[in-house]
Amino acid sequence: MNAAAGGGASVRVENCGKTFADGTRALERATLDIARGETLVLLGPSGCGKTTMLRIIAGLELPDVGGRVLFNGKDVTSEPIERRNVGMVFQSYALFPNMSVADNIGYGLKIRSVGKQERAARVAELVALTGITGLENRRIDQLSGGQRQRVALARAVAIRPGILLLDEPLTALDAALRDRLRGELNRLLRALGITTIYVTHDQSEAMELGDRVVVMRKGAIAQIGTPREIYFQPKNRFVAEFIGAANIIESPIENGHLVLPGGRLPIGAAENLAAAVAMIRPETIAVVEEGRAPLTGTIDSVSFIGDRQRLVISGACAKPLTVDAPNTMKASAGERIGLSIAPDAVRLLPPET
Amino acid sequence: MRDRLIFTGQLLFTLIVAAFLVVPAILSISAGITVNYFRGISSGLTLQWVFQVWELYAGTILLSFEIAFACLAVTLVAGVPAAYALHVHRGRLSRMVEEIITLPVAIPGLALALALLLTYQGFSGFRRSWLFILTGHVIFTMPFMVRSVMAVFGTIDVKTLDEGAASLGASPWRRFRDVIVPNAVPGILAGSLMVVTLSLGEFNLTWMLHTPLTKTLPVGLADSYASMRLEVASAYTLIFFVMIIPLLVAMQMFADKEQAR
């Protein structure tokens, strides 16, 4: 076992694409570097190639010729998964129905010929760590979804893998449990300090867990960045709309202003453009007095969400504008209001090709 | 009132059907322990026919069991991995192989036997040994093993289980041994039950393949029906029952227990 305690391995995916036997192109050639101890999230809608990327890193799929996978600088492309020392949590968990919880967790250690006592000690440690004490002798079909998820995680971590791979580990759970486990998982991954690659289609999972997030679309990488970067500085319309809520505004730019039906919005220095695409997050728009506002509009609808209220404003832009206002503000449909937006909250996007 | 009538009707029907199946067996068995069948049970009960059968045909009974369990061993060793391979590599070729394996169920046993005889007539040592009959039985019973194991593979996510074990470092052989086979146990048991009973009762293929020295139980049965007094043949049936029914019950119980786990 060459994994340094807590550190894990660094991963380099070099020029890896995947074309399946039937000619389907699941993944465009891409290069990715994952630092030792980093948590990288592969995020995207279904069919975007994120699982294929994970399976290539795992060793469950071979990349197209020319692609290479390196762990700690060592080429492992031709090594099957059983020789890569990775821990993997599958979407369906892949727990062995013929073994007890403890035997599932200890299986990887048994394969590695770890002695019975040491194995039992490690299993006990992980059972405590994942909070499933008391379930050691249960059969898998006697566990709830959340418990299965924990067993799968404990089993993957038990072998002290260099890299932990998680394929939509929370998708099979109901919403409330998913939120709770997400927090737990985050703490656990931080505590382990292991290199982690996490696949999900859920952006809030990606935001919370990822040191960096790779947003994928149609087999290609749309953007790589920290959660803040992909949220505030999306590189294109797809990322802007996939992550969080976004107002996408198409309008001309004149003298550093967006020219909109409801007024001229200053956006800082920018060249004049006949057709620009800008993104504005709903929570960056402030509701102000009508008289002093650069932009005015009429409230179409108010939805009270709890921690905030979501207003839909017409007349300000060509399309209805979504605004997240404080939950204490008085607002009603039909009212005319003013809107103010900080210039650096407006992000210009390249026109969609 | 109407419910009672329906119930009585159904009960009666069930009993008649059961009698239709059971009465001939009882008659046959009782014939095997009657001193003289034509004079009826009043002639007295005896075990002499049973002893006589045992003296004459003990060899065939032993050989039958030998072949049945050898057949089981072969179908297990070849059939379970075959089922796994066919399940994992789903494609036109594997479907063709599956069809070919299943073909012997549809082909009359006599035709199969004839093909075997034509193929192996030159190998007289093989032709004369019990292995020749075993070959026929394996060909005939293999689809039952492969099919029932494949049916179980269809209900569990074999691919992901296999990948899960691989991710933990298990070699293909360890994965097969530790994860695939244990989870296929219900299918393996059901298949085994079929293989053993089919092999024990197989007649028409065996009848073509046997030599005077390689007679199995059903062939011996036919032989005794043809050449002995009726009481002897019936005693033979009795022995067949006594041998096979506890075996069937035991295997069924084992399978039930395994399934309930």
Image: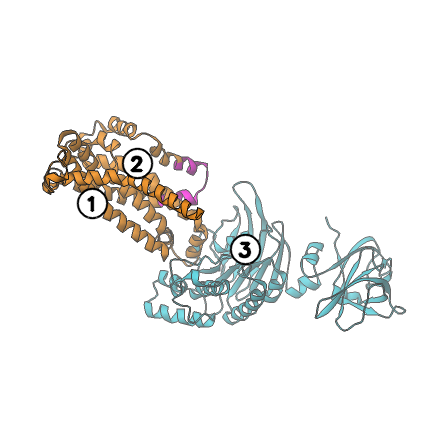
Chain colours: A cyan, B orange
Chain designation of label 2 = B
From what the image shows, is residue A148 above or below residue B52? Answer: below
- Quarter the N terminus of chain A occupies: bottom left
How far separated are the C-alphas under marks 2 and 1? 22 Å
From what the image shows, is residue A94 above or below residue A116? Answer: above
Task: Give, as a three-letter code, the residue at label 1.
Answer: Met
How far separated are the C-alphas under marks 1 and 3? 64 Å
- Identify the magenta region: B81-98
* B211 on left or right of A237: left
Residue B121, quarter of the rendered image: top left
Q: Position of residue A259 (x, y in %)?
A: 86, 58
Task: Give, as a three-letter code, the residue at label 3.
Answer: Val
Q: Is residue B88 found inside the magenta-colored segment of the image?
A: yes
In terms of depth relative to the viewer, which is nearer, A179 or A272? A179
Disc number lying in front (3 or 2) = 2
Give the mark nearer the N terminus: 2 vs 1.
2
Residue highlighted by disc 1: B243
Q: Is residue A25 found inside the magenta-colored segment of the image?
A: no
Residue highlighted by disc 3: A13
Q: Are marks 2 and 1 in contact (CB under 8 Å)?
A: no
Disc number lying in front (2 or 1) = 1
Q: Position of residue A127 (x, y in %)?
A: 43, 70
